[in-house]
Amino acid sequence: METEETLSVRLLGDLEVRRGVEKVALPQSRKTRALLAYLLLTRRSHRRTRLCGLLWDVTDDPRGALRWSLSKIRPIVDAGRRRLVAEREGVAIDAADVSVDAFQVERAVASGLEDVSVEGLEALVELHRGELLEGLDLADFEEYQAWCIAEREQALSRHVRVLEALLGRLRHDPARSLPHARALARADSMAPAAHARVLEDLWALGRVEEAALHHRAATRQLEALAPERARQLDGAFAAIRARKVEAPPIRVESPAVEAPAQVLPSRAVPVASAFVARQRELRVARAALAAAASGRLRVLLLVGEPGIGKSRLLDKILLEAKERGALVARGRSWEVETGRPYAPFHELLRGVASALTDASIDDATWSFLEGAADASRRGAVEAAREKAFASVVSVLRAAAEDRPLVLGLDDVQWCDEASSMLLHVVARSLVDRPALIVLAARAGELVDNTPVMRATRSLRREVGVDRLSLERFDEGQTTELLAALDSSLDAAAVHASSGGNPLYAIELARAGDVAGALPESLAELVRDRIDRLSPEAREVLAFGAVLGRHFDVEWMVELARVEQGELAAALEELERHALLASVEADRPSYAFAHDAVRGVVYADVSDPRRKLMHRRVAELLAPRAADGEEEAALVAHHAQLGGAPELAARACVDAGRRAAASLAGATAEAFVRRGMRCASGLPERTRVPILVELYQVHLSAGRPRDRDDVARALGELAERALVLGDVEHARLGYQLLGYLRWEVGDVPDAAKHILEAEWVTRGAEGPERMRALAEAGRCLALLERNLPEADGYLLEASALAKQLLAEPASLVDARALLSCHRGDSAAAMEGFERAKLLARREGDRTVEVQVIEHEVMCAVDAGLLDRAEGRAEELAVLAEHVRGGSDLPAANALLALVRHLRAPDASLAARIDELRRADSKRRLAFVLNRAALAELARGELGRAAELAREASAAASVLDRPSEMAIAEAVGVEVARARGDEREGEAHRASLRSLLDARLSAVATAHALRALGSGDDALPSAAARSPGG
Amino acid sequence: MALVLVERCFDEPVGFDVLQCKEARSAWCLEAYRVRPLRSWVSEDGRYILCEYDAPDAESVQRAQEQAGMPFTRIWAATAVEYPRRDER
């Protein structure tokens, strides 16, 4: 018994909640509705953190969003009693007393369908109004989407079982069985048996032509995706035709496949020309346009439910503006393109550019907007963005110079992150121009798009936004609409049925003579119309829905496997019925006349078929994406939905790179997460390289929050790649790890660094390769250049060494050098000692001398003078025996330096002079700088300044920033002691410019001390300093 | 940048091609040290070779040579002294 407080929920088809018989208004936010459905269907409590991760991005303030959504759900379910249990940690809906359609079917199937009457089975079929959670897809949230797809599969298989049970009972009643057979063929469209039953029933009813038509449509559909099943159906149809029927076929003797299909007519209605009602909105828009024309930007936001007429109003406003002499351009976002940076702006800016003669958007800007920037250098990308934005701004400002500029952006609820940013920039730059920006959005879904919300919120604050909410039509307006459409339908009935939604009313008018009661939903209405289309048109329409946005006519030939002629006829048919409309693009393209209609068509394609179709689209687009012609984001979308995880994961890498190149960090990270999920089930050999590349995207998208986890994962992946013999990815992994450990913004560009490393290990195998890598790493470490890359080489060499059970001295020395640079003198000392032993064991005197020299220098900087002196003495003895060069003068100079640091040593000057003559600028700079620091401490300012000056000159020839910084730091201190402001400022300026480089921990410490607190450059330098 | 000379002396004649090949394999390393080979003189008997480099200092050349595993006897920074041409005397 239904009382006022009885709550019933329909999850099969559009989500619907009723209190008694009264429909409850649902929140428009798709995520909120998805959450409601999730809580209902799962029937248990979920941790808040889990729900946050399920439906929101880390950048969305998930906890806040969850709270907001729950506050919308509470009034819906808490009628009469408290059902939403939202505790501190767990959230659940207590649905014990709620009637849920999906559960009814589930219970019936579980307890066996054998005992259910035919009427009972028909009632169960009736409950299946459409796909489970229809329209509640959230493709970017894989976990939710995976759950949703799994639930749908189960619901569909239950529906199929009910239909099969019913059809089993109705074997001798074709008239009653036919609609159910059709439903089964729709639900299980890839099953030849399901189509055979339709044919059987039609044949038994003597509806031969319809049988031939269905056969043709089903064969076409099967042939496109599973040719062997088409042959099975052919066989079944041949068997049916051979059967003797009660009512013999009329007219057609042999219903051959080639028999021309007779397509039942549906009413083609002239549409777009009619613009009715919305006078209030138009007045506001006209006022905004007039205000804009006077030289001040206005922003208009049109919001409303799907089908309410936003796009129509937007077009009308643009048309009127154009008629009044404004320059008008329009862009649109597509749901499948939310991962494609700047997508709506491509269209919009092309529109502006084509209207301008004296200003144009340069190639560099186009290439940035198309994501072609080099993502490995963050600084460069940022600069490219700044230039591109400046160019867009200047073109738009120029466009609004002598006439009003009106920009329209439709469906901004699907606008990508990068475009939201550009929109904000553009709007702010047009503040003092005669410009009007009109945005149209689905109100509910707008709140699900955090970047757009952020942009519109800022715009509201900074330039003001007029929000126009489009309400449903009243009966008078519906009547007006029907009159404009020249429809003879009863306006009152249409209004009652459509609830004042104009799209629904238009669809009703198009459906023409609706026999009996008007269809209950837009879905039913559209379905009826589609059933009357030719098989080719239906196939094209289904692929169009799967593609999800405008599509190239050429693609359709490949996708739907139709001839050019057939396609032309199908497109014409679909256009005549206003299901598709041609859109402006470089090549002939079409799009759905309305996305709500696309949604219906899409939901109506059965799941397995949809999967195959998505896969087909992904395979078609993949090579085009590789050529840069199409978007990797689209391939990722289709491959994922098509169950092609490898293709999807690879496309996620490409799409992520593009997003990172457009500085759309959150988008790039979303692709990384998606790619990782897709890759997780792949075999190791395929998975490892993809994951390494995904981490590369992750690091180029921004500094990771989970640094340690990423480092651990990368280390393991690189090692696996090495074991698998995938040298390229092992190297990339170690390079990334190196960069991560040195926390730099730039990430190695795979192609570039592999090219460089080619030099290092060309043709080398095993031990030779390890040695070459160790040398390369050591070379860079000694030069104090590309230290992250050096670290990467050394990590790879270490992993190889571990495999080979080897430990070369040069490798250990190089690692100790990096530790010393980082300021970890304990690790460095230990490393140098070990390297010394190893060099001795290898009998390599040259390396031994170098290692000891490194140890002396490191000990000096760490203030370990006893150790430094002991090693310097050892070095001086050894250097006697090595071949000529600067080793001996260097050893002597270092020994003199250590002694001088304890107490003034007159021999130092002579030793320095020898070093000068040996032309060893690196050691000279080191010794001079330490001597200068000692003189400074002793108050010998003149001497300190002189030594530092020479050190600085030597260091700058070699481009060694750390020694240059120490020299400048001495300069600052000397000037300060002398009270020489001008001199001090000059040194401070040089020092600040050096802080951008990767200084050693010692140099950073001297620099920071010299600059003192209060210097702006300090915090970033301190943060970057590897030592602290 | 300075002119740096590398002397190589051998007991047996050495094929210059072999040395050049070895150095080319470490071109990356030379580049990193900003050491640029300019030209070489090879004695007729193949036992002495003098190579001229453009480099920041002598030590850079030494390090690069060591890392490339190139044999050398002495390395020194030098200044080129051009003789005035006959017509300028």
Image (cartoon, rainbow, N blue to C red):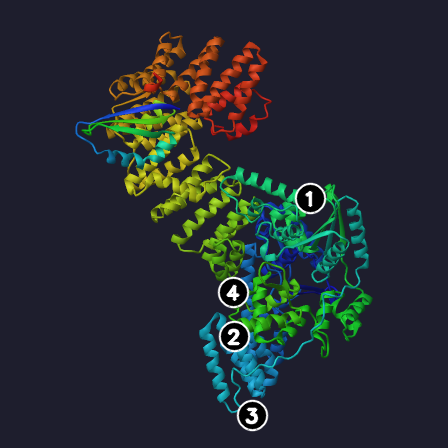
Q: Amino acid at mark 4?
A: Lys
Query: Is label 2 on the same chain as label 1?
Result: yes
Q: Quote the CA–CA distance across marks 4 and 1.
A: 47 Å
Query: Is label 3 on the same chain as label 1?
Result: yes
In terms of depth relative to the viewer, which is nearer, A157 or A714? A714
Q: Which mark is residue A996?
A: none
Residue A571 placement: quadrant: bottom right
Q: Which mark is residue A611?
A: 4
Q: Of discs 3 and 1, which sits in the foreground?
A: 1
Residue A87 in view (yes/no): no
Q: Quote the CA–CA distance across marks 2 and 3.
A: 29 Å
Q: Position of residue A66 (x, y in %)?
A: 64, 50
Vertically, is A116 above or below A620? below
Name which residue lies at 56% across and 26% down.
Answer: A1018
Q: Amino acid at mark 3?
A: Glu
Q: Residues within 10 Å of mark 3 (few under 14, many from 20)?
A: few
Q: Position of residue A285 (x, y in %)?
A: 78, 53
Q: Chain of mark 3?
A: A
Q: On the rendered structure, is A224 left or right of A512?
A: left
Q: On the rendered structure, is A784 left or right of B40?
A: right
Q: Are marks 2 and 1 in contact (CB under 8 Å)?
A: no
- Residue that protrudes farthest toward the front in the picture: B87
Q: Quote the CA–CA distance across marks 3 and 1.
A: 78 Å
Q: Chain of mark 4?
A: A
Residue A684 in view (yes/no): yes
Q: Chain of mark 2?
A: A
Q: Could you say whether the residue bearing mark 2 is in a helix, strand or loop?
A: helix
Which residue matches tag 2?
Answer: A220
Q: Amino acid at mark 1?
A: Ala
Which residue matches tag 3?
Answer: A246
Which residue matches tag 1?
Answer: A398
